Image: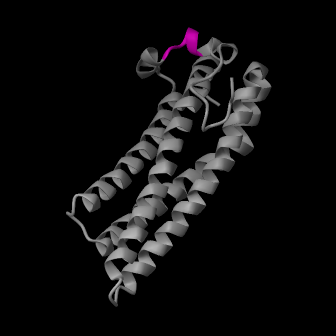
Amino acid sequence: MSLSLDTRQGWPAELLFLLERYPRATWPTQQSVGVQFWLEVHDHFRRDCVGLEMAADDHRAGRTSVAQLAVIAAPRLRGLIAGLKGHHQIEDFHYFPAFRRHEPRLTAGLEALERDHEELQSDVNAALAALGELRAAAERATGHDVASTLALAANRYIDVTARLCRRLCRHLSDEEDLVIPLLVERGDY
């Protein structure tokens, strides 16, 4: 089984021993501050992605122009990225090393999650570039080929951002399957 973000369909059985002990259905009842905080942060990222998807849907449905999409998208995307950067840094430099020390059997999964962070950074860079192109196209919208240039910029931004959010949500779910049961098992870190 591949542990790559693009091909992973969950974790192999040898990484799920804690999830079997503490399935998702039990998480809402956990009194752990760490569990609730981790899930809240991840839910915030998911809500940010929903907001980006809603802005894309509004544009596709003709409810917003390219210029409006550019204005709406900028703070939403940048907010998601800022939160993600800090979250991934603390995981890579603090939590994941501590988790590996406490539960070495999760090492392969934690290393896969760290690789996900690198891959997601490429998606972040692509989304920021596409946002820049979208904003530039909206600002210089003059001439006879304006509509096609604007449509191309909007579609590229929407596609690249959708890829980021799709892959991020896969990552968040997989991360939770390893981390939340460990937090329950070992207590707050």
The C terminus, quarter of image: top right
Q: Is residue 111 magenta?
A: no
Question: In this picture, is 38 found above or below 18?
Answer: below
Name the outermost residue toward the top: 21
| Nearest the eye: 33 or 18 | 18
Q: Quadrant of residue 28?
A: top left
Question: Is 120 left or right of 28, judged from the image as shown?
Answer: right
Residue drawn at (61%, 49%) of the image: 120
> Looking at the image, which is closer to me, 54 or 147?
147
Q: Main secondary structure of the magenta part?
A: helix
* Residue occupying the point 63% across, 54% down: 121
Residue 124, position in %: x, y?
57, 57
State left or right for residue 189 relative to residue 83: right
Front residue (pair 108, 65): 65
Q: Is residue 131 above or below residue 181?
A: below
The stretch drawn in magenta includes residue 22: yes
Can residue 111 be seen by looking at this rendering?
yes
The colour mode here is one colour
In the rendered image, residue 74, in percent from the top left (x then y), is placed at 42, 67
Mark count: 0
Q: Which residues are magenta?
A: 19-23
Residue visible at 41% across and 18% down? 29
Residue 91, visible in the rendered structure: no
Residue 64 x %, y %: 24, 67
Q: Quadrant of residue 26?
A: top left
Q: Quadrant of the N terminus?
A: top right
In the displayed structure, would residue 5 be above or below residue 151?
A: above
Task: Identify the residue shown where x is 42% and y is 43%.
Answer: 46
Q: Quadrant of residue 72?
A: bottom left
